[in-house]
Image: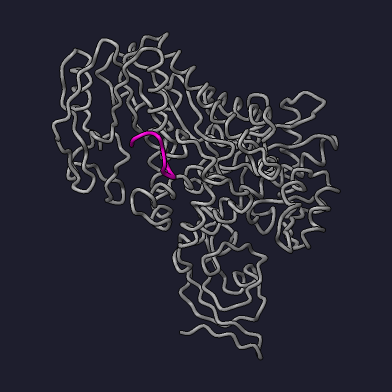
Amino acid sequence: MPYICNKFLSMITIHIQNTNKDLTIPFGMTVLELAKQEKIQLEYPVMGALINNKVRECAYRIHKPCTVQFFDMTSSYGHLMYTRSVYFILYKAVKEILPKQVRLKILHSISGGKYCELDHLNQALDQNLVNRLYKRMREIVESDMTFERIELPSEEAVLKFKEEGLEDKFELLRHRTRIYTSIYKLGDTVNYYFGNLAPSTGVIHLFGLELYESGLLLKVPQPQHPTTLSHTHRVPKLFSVYQDYKKWANTIGTPYVYNLNNKIAEGKIQEIIMITEAYHEKLLARLADQIYERQAKVVLISGPSSSGKTTTCKRLSVQLGILGYDPVQISVDDFFVEREETPKDENGQYDFESVEAIDLKLFNDTLKRLINGEEVPLPTFDFTQGKKVWKGNTIKLKSNSIMVIEGIHCLNPRLTEQIDDSIKFKLFVSALTCISIDQQNPIPTTDNRLIRRIIRDYNYRGYSAQETISRWSSVRRGENRNIFPFQENADAMFNTSLICEMGMLKQYAIPILAAVPENCVEFAEAYRLLKFLSYFKVIPEKNIPGTSILREFVGGSKFKY
């Protein structure tokens, strides 16, 4: 039926997708009021709704004809709202229990949770303090306090943040061009969050708080396992890389988005770009030295989607060349099995992320023959035809040759099970974002990689942002099965993220994301990413060096792919 708005009766016609029902509601009814009226029953409490494919919280007032789809914390949208809400509960507990000068910093994901630190803490962070914080958090949850969203004129909002001692929020938002800015209140506690929050603390049914390294590990249940918290497992190599980059971002004065934006406004961004690119080169040179000292014959580079494996392979090869090596680059992707032999996932779709999608016998046989000094033919996988093509390409290793191999399964022992471990050097790469929006709004690594992939897929694979977003959950499931369980097998880790990255990628991503139609479910994620990018000032393309990791995604690289 057509959607109409009767201004005289102040009624609106809407469609509820959960119940496939059309109805007329009063102008200004909230999402939560509508859910109660229609007795919407989800597995867990209603967190919010997609209103015309935009994420809205329970307090949102419906003011025009629309489609409505309610969701709970088992959806990706609801899970983000749940997580941010737990951030706020922890912030409130810290503010109430600890001295005024203590600052909660939510830094990054690790070990199934978010790693946090308490700056300016004048006492030991021990189990007793963790227990006190957790107890206060539980009390806040049990009191079922409302997360109140307030729209204020931007000038008034930023002054409010300054009064509350939230200098990072003040600096982030004081040059914002929007007339109004949203703030959140939980009782008498004020903060700002990138995205919506839950309706109240009472819907937060499960969370955890633990000592972890020198800080706290804040845990929430995952959407697919809403009644349990994941087991804490130590990942010392990954944690060390995160910590090193966070410290380095502080050293050069760019831990937060506002620092980066200030550098751009002051005309100092080229210096930061040169420093960050030089830092990458320094780390790659160190890796080459480690490989030389190990006397490795095979370098295996693994990492999740859009982590920059290919460019890392090429830049590392340059550093190995400085040491006298003749690097031979090999891509595992050329060793896929024929399309009809590809394994399928639980949904009956081809599972290209499985190690069984690789011709393991051929791959191991090729490496063994190369190591034995033979001249060996190499296949090229034709993704259009879905089969290996033999074009007459052959290689034979020289006395100073070293194989540099990249692929998502390179840390899986099965990939090179017939090769002696003593001649391998294993490297894990990922874009571990080292800059945050502010002290309580970390930037997920997955957002960094998704934006890279959206740009690359559009430029080189002919995929729209809608298509890339629709595949992303499947890609991430494959990573969780096939890549991350093996990351600590690495001899070393390399962070490919750049402090200036989002400012550089913004100009490419915005038109691609803006083309996602409003009438598809992927619009909600595109809209969220556009809002995320709005925090960053643009850094012109001319500032991106020709050997930068980012050139793998935006084009114009000095390397041949």
Q: Nearer the viewer, residue 205 or 347?
A: 347
Q: Does residue 15 appear left or right of residue 326 in this picture?
A: right
Q: In the image, which residues are magenta?
A: 552-561
Q: Nearer the viewer, residue 273 or 228?
A: 273
Question: Looking at the image, which residue is at 39% across and 17% down?
Answer: 320
Q: Is residue 26 magenta?
A: no
In percent of width and height, residue 214 lies at 67, 24
Question: Looking at the image, which residue is at 56% across and 64% down?
Answer: 49
Q: Is residue 370 above or below residue 431?
A: above
In percent of width and height, residue 438 lies at 69, 43
Q: Nearer the viewer, residue 170 or 21?
A: 170
Query: Quick one: quadrant of the C terminus?
Result: top left
Question: Looking at the image, which residue is at 48% across and 77% down?
Answer: 21
Q: Is residue 316 above or below residue 548?
A: above
Q: Does residue 428 appear left or right of residue 221 in this picture?
A: left
Q: For the view shown, which residue lies furthest in the bottom direction?
A: 8
Q: Is residue 555 magenta?
A: yes
Magenta stretch, main secondary structure, is loop
Question: Looking at the image, which residue is at 74% across and 39% down?
Answer: 135
In percent of width and height, residue 524 lies at 51, 60
